[in-house]
Amino acid sequence: MRQTDAIPEATQTAKKQLAAGDISGAERLLFQQLQLTPQDRETHYYYCVCLRYLARLSDAQGELETLLTRFPRFARGYQEIGYTFKALNEPDKALSSFRTAVTLNDALLGSWRALIEMTSTTYHPVIYDEAQTQTRNLEGLPKALLQVRDWINEGRLAQAEQLCRQFLLRHPKQVEGMRLLAYIGVQTEVLDDAEVLLENAVRFEPDNDLARFDYMGVLYKRQKYAASFAQAEQLIEKAPDNVRHQTAYANQCVAIGRFDEAIAIYDQVIPKVPDPALVHLLKAHALKTIDQTEQAIKAYRAAYENKPGFGDAFWSLANLKTYRFTDLEVETMLASVAEPNLSPVDHVHLNFALGKHFEDAKDFERAFGFYQQGNTVKQGQIGFDSELLSKRLSLQTSVCSETLFK
């Protein structure tokens, strides 16, 4: 379910009341608005915040569970239920909720601070160290860029872009701002602007590995493979033991046809990473490209074995065209696609893989059902509107007439 940027006027008024300390007044107004727009995410969210502030914790928990059922990837919802569980003295549930929140939106400073408070160097030391690092990084950001990151993570790209551009007008050489605006450019497929931004970013700060990594990625997306490989070389020379840089270098090797070198690096990286599923997938793609199909199949299977429900691994197997899924693989996909918290990307890939399986089995009705479900999820992701596209094409046709080109 998607949430638009438009927030009801009553909800905006209630937010001001909440900020001013009028919790009861905000709660009443939000409750009334919720009767009118029960599917509005922001109204429901702030209503839950009010319930917690009013110490109606059981009510808050119930409302938040409903909210997260409707919006299963709403990071601030997980943060709020984390606060609620913390107030209910359920630390394990609170910790899990805050972890989910920062996984979905790593700009949630409140969740990182809560994780620091709830962990220590002896109790969940890995989480504690990560939370300390992320908190320092976020606290070092200008408030405007922190808001930009938050909006990016919530998919509110138009608002994020506007604020980021305003910030860069005042601070034209602020590299983190340039990185964020370039990221928005990548998400909206304005790759030429992103390339220019990042080219300047690495010129302003040549030792900024994050900016160089982003620059490499944009060059790769623009199919400037020699240039992206050159950036990868600089990264690997500077930090040869950095696993992220090693993986990126291997990816660039694949792009320029150095497959054996890439596969060898993937093999070195796999035992070093806590979640090797993606690296297995990348290795499988490389093996498939050089026609080592049986080895590719083993690598694709290793990918989903390390990450159950990894849709890309199953879809890649289906996309081999000659591969036939085992009964156990089909059962695994059917169970995974029914998971309520499955990511949209995995949802799409699993539906398409199941569609291909049932098509091969001549069960065309079930195949069509899975293809249709996958396309529905995909359409929700990209916001495709066939009528709008037709109108745009019609306008282009009327303007770009034969007369125009004479």
Image (cartoon, rainbow, N blue to C red):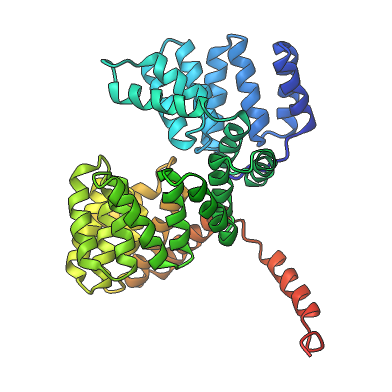
Residue 71: x and y, percent?
55, 38
- 183 horizontally vs 362: left or right: right
**Residue 332 can be seen in this image:** no
**Residue 95 can be seen in this image:** yes
Q: How many numbered dots are placed on residues in this image?
A: 0
Q: Quadrant where the N terminus lies?
A: top right
Residue 274 or residue 169, whichever sits in front:
169
Query: Which residue is rendered at x = 24% and y = 42% of the image?
Result: 273
Residue 120: x and y, percent?
32, 15
- 172 horizontally vs 80: left or right: right
- 20 horizontally vs 94: left or right: right
Residue 401 or residue 80, whichever sits in front:
401
Residue 191: x and y, percent?
56, 60
Residue 327: x and y, percent?
23, 58
- 106 horizontally vs 54: left or right: left
Query: Which residue is rendered at x = 40% and y = 64% of the image?
Result: 355
Query: Which residue is rendered at x = 40% and y = 58% of the image?
Result: 349
Q: Quadrant where the C terminus lies?
A: bottom right
Residue 2 or residue 290, whichever sits in front:
290
Can you say whether 279 is above or below 160 in the image?
below
Can you say whether 103 is above or below 359 in the image?
above
Name the image quarter holding residue 228: bottom left
Query: Which residue is rendered at x = 80% and y = 79% of the image?
Result: 398
Can you say whether 81 is above or below 351 in the image?
above
Can you say whether 233 is above or below 67 in the image?
below
Residue 244 or residue 21, whichever sits in front:
244
